Amino acid sequence: MEEQKFPQNLTPFAILAGALLIAGAILYAGGVDLAPRGTADLSPPEEAQASQPDAAGEPFVGSQDAPLTLFYWSDFQCFYCKNFEQETLPFLVKEYVDTGKLRIVFKDLQFLGLGSFVAGLASKAVWETTPERYLEWHEAMFAKQGAENGGWSSREDILAITEELGIDKERIGRLMEEKEAEYGAEQEEDQKEAQEFGITGAPGFILGSSEISGARPLAEFQAAIEAELKGKE
């Protein structure tokens, strides 16, 4: 499957600024500190820092002691990301995450407009407040995905999705507003890191020393994971 390409020099802040000039309005959204209280530092070991993306403070599923980490860049409005979410991610979670073999770290590549930017802010707020519900919320967002920039990812709609899951939407909304700059900076850092690791579109993945582009068939992920695990034996 293909991937959605993103402009190499277009950061989330640039997207936001341009849209605000066109719309003549102020985006009511915000950001949040990614690391939930009490969460240990998720950075890779010091010797691996030069060859692995930064996991510190990022949303993740799986054990911190898992032998293998899959870094996953996505945009909540990305159609190909939805394909991966619904066709491949559930199997990877059941087969590898739940068995302690794999940790999946979620990285921002929110480049498809203001709706993506706002969704990225909400994502960080959910991770800070209810990390144990993050994957459920993440999956619900993709399940509700509508047309690109079709309005489904407005602040109000995202908070409605959040409320449907029983997550405190008032707290999420407040954090989005209060920490906008912090979240925006984190989104931009994730995009810069994607470029550094050769990620040119969404979804994009780093697995060990390999880069995987697009919503590839499940068999390709299985083969790559099994090869990496075998190399660690």
Image (cartoon, rainbow, N blue to C red):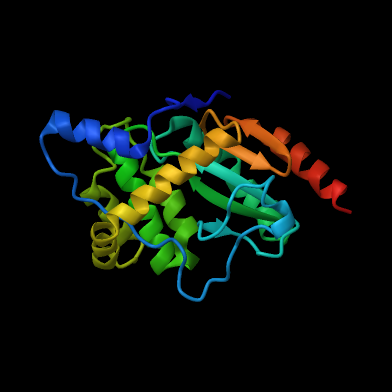
- Quarter of the image that includes the C terminus: bottom right
The answer to whether any part of residue 161 appears in the image is no
Residue nearest the viewer, comparing 21 with 127: 21
Residue nearest the viewer, comparing 41 with 153: 41
Query: Relative to residue 224, is residue 92 depicted above or below?
Result: below
Residue nearest the viewer, comparing 153 with 143: 153
Q: Residue furthest left?
A: 24
Question: x, y percentage for residue 75?
Answer: 43, 39
Q: Is residue 116 left or right of residue 202?
A: left
What residue is shown at x 49% (from left), y 31% (from top)? 80
Question: x, y percentage for residue 218?
Answer: 67, 36
Question: x, y percentage for residue 214?
Answer: 57, 29
Query: Relative to residue 217, is residue 52 depicted above or below?
Result: below
Which quadrant of the figure has residue 127? bottom left
Q: Residue furthest right?
A: 233
What residue is shown at x 36% (from left), y 53% (from top)? 183
